[in-house]
Amino acid sequence: MYCHLTLLFICIAVLSFRIKDSMYHALTYATILEMQAMMTFNPEDILTAGSTMKDAQAVCQRSRKKSSFNSLASRSFTEEELHAELCYAECLLQRAALTFLQVTRFLIGVVLLLRELHAVLQSAGYAQGENHRHFEAGVKLGVGSFNLMLSMLPTRILRLLEFVGFSGNKEFGLQQLEEGSSTHTFRAFLCNMLLLCYHTFMSFILGTGEGDVADAERLLQPYLKQYPKVNLFAIGRFEECCEAQQAWKQFHHMCYWELMWCFTYKRHWKMAYFYADLLSKENTWSKATYAYMKGSYLSMLTREECKVFGESEEGLFRQVPGLKQKIAGKSLPTEKFAIRKARRYLTEKPIPLPVPPLEMMYIWNGYTVIGKHKELTEGILETLNEAQKQLESNPRTELSTDDQCLVSLLKGLCLKQLGFQEEAEHYFTLVLCNENQIKFDHYLVPNALLEHGLLCLEQGRRVEAIKLLEAAKQNYKNYSMESRTHFRIQAALQKDHTHSPPKVLCSRSY
């Protein structure tokens, strides 16, 4: 061991003489320092390795061929230039590994510190001064938010985090935040905000809609009484929120987005279009999504009704692919979904989408929201019944099965919310029976399995539910909004830990 260390130190000393002018010396030297950082986990070693690797990358850059838009395979290189490309790629890879190491170390430090602080809070052997309640609320905020956040992650991510010692308990996290929100401290506000976000947003978008809306109302009331015009807490008063201030337009945009969905739930297509249009003009988050939503609402109107807006559904849908953008190098999942749906309008004779706003409403888990209001659910079901009749009367096309399966899935959701569980189950199974005829909308099958599984859970058919949920998780990959579906599956599976392979029978197809 002593000989190996001696040899390593000699290598480092030799390499250090040429790290400024030789890419292989620079890369090797940086690699050795990174190996040291990986073994020691010392923050100074990590920073040193990162800085050295960045310098090595700069040395490689000097020997690379000048940038071109052509692929590497179509360009000519000297041997040195090819090696420079390879070394440059290795530098990037190792810098990525260091970034992961820094994040992991940071998370471990956070977890360990929060655990220690929570242990201190549970003990009685420390001095409690006049500001103790602020300390207590801070610990509950940290422990609660971390547990809640981790508990909602999909299984495949949780397994990776558990490998490095992380785990989350949703019930414990909510309890800690609830206790923190009841304190008269400045952190009580933050605990309240997280609880409200969970009950009114995260549980619907990333879960199974089990957020406690009544509890959210209870949390809101003290703030609404004290600050009747406050922006952050006037969730049910979006228009008042816009009127209350003009300085932060971002709050207006959040309200426009919520108002758009409120009018969608009520099937007031013109008003929903109005707010989607406002967003498309003022907000830059996702122009593609806004254009898609505008086209969706116009598709629910007659051509005569659309004339007043000066736009058409075909024109808007054709704009969608060109408005695609990337944030931090990644495309937005909602944009990718919108582009896939809008591509049928790029042909000379497009086949109209049947109920695009109601489909996007499902992507944002709106059926769990309207399920709490019978009249809204019955209204949506009426629109879906009309769409189904229209599909049945139209000539069959290559997309007929996709459209019929979509309507079946959405009808199943409405029927489940209205208490017609056998009829809902029939429609979910119908989607699965037509799996092989679906041309593009492959996301419908795992989501039908998910919704069928949730229905079985509600009925106490746990074994069957877990089979369906596991089928949705294990048997389908690379479909639209896959991560969102996995978040919801994970939330459902947390109710039971039994696993067995799926087998679903069907007797009818289109």
Image: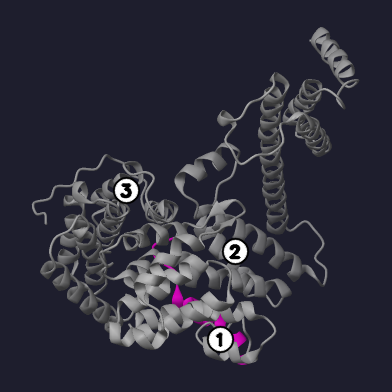
Residue 61 seen from this side: yes
Q: Is residue 99 magenta?
A: no
What kind of residue is marked 1?
Gln
State the extent of the magenta-drawn residues as a range. 207-225
Residue 166 higher or lower than 456, as above or below: above
Q: Which residue in the protein does label 3 denote?
A: 472
Mark 3: which secondary structure?
helix
Q: Which residue in the protein does label 1 denote?
A: 221
What kind of residue is marked 3?
Ala
Q: Main secondary structure of the magenta part?
A: helix
Give the image quarter of residue 476.
Answer: top left
User: In the image, residue 156 lies at what x, y percent?
Assistant: 47, 42
Q: Which badge, 1 or 2, comes first in the chain's sequence?
A: 2
Mark 2: which secondary structure?
helix
Q: CA distance from mark 2 to mark 3?
A: 33 Å
Q: Which mark is residue 176?
A: 2
Q: Is residue 210 magenta?
A: yes
Asked whether, in this view, residue 215 is left or right of residue 208, the answer is: right
Q: CA distance from mark 1 to mark 3?
A: 40 Å
Residue at 14% x, 72% y is: 389
Give the image quarter of residue 247.
Answer: bottom right
Q: How many marks?
A: 3
User: In the image, residue 241 lies at what x, y percent?
Assistant: 58, 87
What kind of residue is marked 2?
Gln
Mark 1 vs 2: CB contact within 8 A: no
Asked whether, in this view, residue 116 is left or right of residue 361, the answer is: right
Farthest residue in the top direction? 3
